[in-house]
Amino acid sequence: MGARANIVLHYGARPDGVEYDPIWLYSHWGGADLAVVLQSALVRGRPRWDDPSYLARIIFSEMIRDEILEETGYGISPFQTNNEYPVLHMDLKANTVRCGGHTASFSEYCDLTNPITFIQGLDNED
């Protein structure tokens, strides 16, 4: 059992047109709250919205903040890990969050009263 969920970081295409590989951030237990954790990370990371490597680290740090020394519970992967909740897709070039048919700018996502409503009613496949 768990509450498995993923955030996937996209960065679009390189100058030669080939897409960069996505980076998947995995939480084994945090699925129910991952949308809220992402909002907290974006609020804290606002000065780094245009710095993808720092923003990625801020997001993952927010995910693991209370369990930084644990050997399980979280992961970083080039592929989707086990999943039970809707996937949160982040476009680090366009500064947007997408889940299912919903898309919000980082600013709009930060302003959501309850980011869990952003993923409610969506399938865990995306």
Image (tube, rainbow, N blue to C red):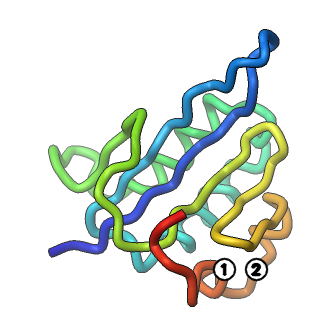
Q: Name the spot of residue 68 as percent of width and height, x first.
A: 29, 47
Task: State the residue in front, 102 or 51.
Answer: 102
* Residue identified by numbered label 1: 118
Circles 1 and 2 in contact, beta carbons < 8 Å:
yes
Task: State the residue in front, 40 or 84.
Answer: 84
Q: Quadrant of residue 106?
A: bottom right
Q: Name the spot of residue 123 as percent of width and height, x first.
A: 50, 78
Q: Secondary structure at mark 2?
A: loop
If the image is split into quadrants, where does the C terminus sit? bottom right
Q: Residues within 10 Å of mark 1 (few under 14, many from 20)?
A: many
Picture residue at 39% right of the left edge, 64% below the top: 5
Please name the amino acid that badge 2 sits on: Leu
**CA–CA distance in space, label 1 to label 2:** 8 Å
Q: Name the spot of residue 61 as percent of width and height, x first.
A: 46, 47
Residue 112, disc: 2
If the image is split into quadrants, where does the N terminus sit? bottom left
Q: Is residue 55 above or below residue 117?
A: above
Please name the amino acid that badge 1 sits on: Phe
Total numbered labels: 2
Q: Name the spot of residue 97 as percent of width and height, x first.
A: 71, 59
Q: Quadrant of residue 53?
A: top right
